[in-house]
Image (cartoon, grey):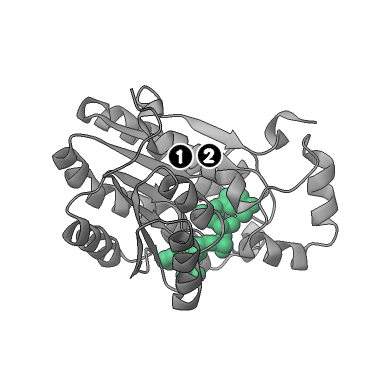
């Protein structure tokens, strides 16, 4: 058994051009898979491709705005056209709007739901027939501590990340018979562009996360590489429908 080999496999990682997505892309690439990173920002993509190629990976960037269903379909179609198959999909692209619920505008609510939840639905739906054709596959959806907890300034974000967990369970039950495993990862506080923005807005956030996290530190994108490698590989073939915190203990501390 080669539990941790992804040689010959093809992965698509949305938002793989930076932050957690790039950390996960590195984990999957380290096991030998070809990695397609998708996003909007081409400068970030160029740097991400250089990092992946530096580690010897075969990697390409496909531009896509995953809030748009046609872009999700085109992304999966282009990946399959280029590499002939699709085995792994990481639905990682996401965003947040920091506002109290009473102040959240309709377009802000829709943008967060479209970015974090509908994007994952449409990419998964497009990936399903390709994984069927490949004889199985792995889908990894990115939730959050906000899949578990509430927070006053994160209504749309929390709704989308709670939805990710339930969508994961539904798809895991639907597609288990097709040898497709669908799991969610719930990152703790990870040092990325997203949380750098939050730390600029919220005084004391950096220290309060350190204090509340049993491991006493923020996570890094590379802390997300191992869980992505595990959930993408044959080692997790009997693991489906789970929501796994990768959080230095944040969700089990007081
Ligand atoms: P970043 O802002 O660093 O990365 C987000 C990525 O998503 C970017 O690469 C961005 O690419 C991409 N993206 C966003 N919107 C779109 C879109 N419409 N179309 C295509 N790509 C898009 O943040 P993180 O790495 O922190 O976040 C990644 C995921 O992890 C998100 O789902 C987030 O909610 C989740 N998460 C993050 C945590 C943290 O502490 N950092 C904790 C828990 C969950 P581009 O710039 O090219 O648009």
Q: In this view, does 244 lie above or below 76?
A: above
When asked about the image quadrant of residue 153, the answer is bottom right
Q: Is residue 82 left or right of residue 229?
A: left
Figure quadrant of the C terminus: top right
**Rendered location of residue 162, percent (x, y):** 51, 42
Q: Mark 2 points at which residue?
A: 226
**Rendered location of residue 182, percent (x, y):** 36, 35
Q: Mark 1 points at which residue?
A: 229
Q: Is disc 1 placed on a helix, strand or loop?
A: helix
Q: In this view, does 146 lie to the left or right of 228?
A: right
Does label 1 point to a residue whose CB lies under 8 Å from ligand 1?
no
In the image, 131 versus 7, the foreground residue is 7
**Rendered location of residue 201, percent (x, y):** 76, 67
Residue at image coords 40%, 32%? 4
Residues under numbered marks 1 and 2 in contact, where contact means CB atoms less than 8 Å apart: yes
**Rendered location of residue 158, percent (x, y):** 57, 48
Q: Is residue 66 visible?
A: yes
Figure quadrant of the N terminus: top left
């Amino acid at each position: 058994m080669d539990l941790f080999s992804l040689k010959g496999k093809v992965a698509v990682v949305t938002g793989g051009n930076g932050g957690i997505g790039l950390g996960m892309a590195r984990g999957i690439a380290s096991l030998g898979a070809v990695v397609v990173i998708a996003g909007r920002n081409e400068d970030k993509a160029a740097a991400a491709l250089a990092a992946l190629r530096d580690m010897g990976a075969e990697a390409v960037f496909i531009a896509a705005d995953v809030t748009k269903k046609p872009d999700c379909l085109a992304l999966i179609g282009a990946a399959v056209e280029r590499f002939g198959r699709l085995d792994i999909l990481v639905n990682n692209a996401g965003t947040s709007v920091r506002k109290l619920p009473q102040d959240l505008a309709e377009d802000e609510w829709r943008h967060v739901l479209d970015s974090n939840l509908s994007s994952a639905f449409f990419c998964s739906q497009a990936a399903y027939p390709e994984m069927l054709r490949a004889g199985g596959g792995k889908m990894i959806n990115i939730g959050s501590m906000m899949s578990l907890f509430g927070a006053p300034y994160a209504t749309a974000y929390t709704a989308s990340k709670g939805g990710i967990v339930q969508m994961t369970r539904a798809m895991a039950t639907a597609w288990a018979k097709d040898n497709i495993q669908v799991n969610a990862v719930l990152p703790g506080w990870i040092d990325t562009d997203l949380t750098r923005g939050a730390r600029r807005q919220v005084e004391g956030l950096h220290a309060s996360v350190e204090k509340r996290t049993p491991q006493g530190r923020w996570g890094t994108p590379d802390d997300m590489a191992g869980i992505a490698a595990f959930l993408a590989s044959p080692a997790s073939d009997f693991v489906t429908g789970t929501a796994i915190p990768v959080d230095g203990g944040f969700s089990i501390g007081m």
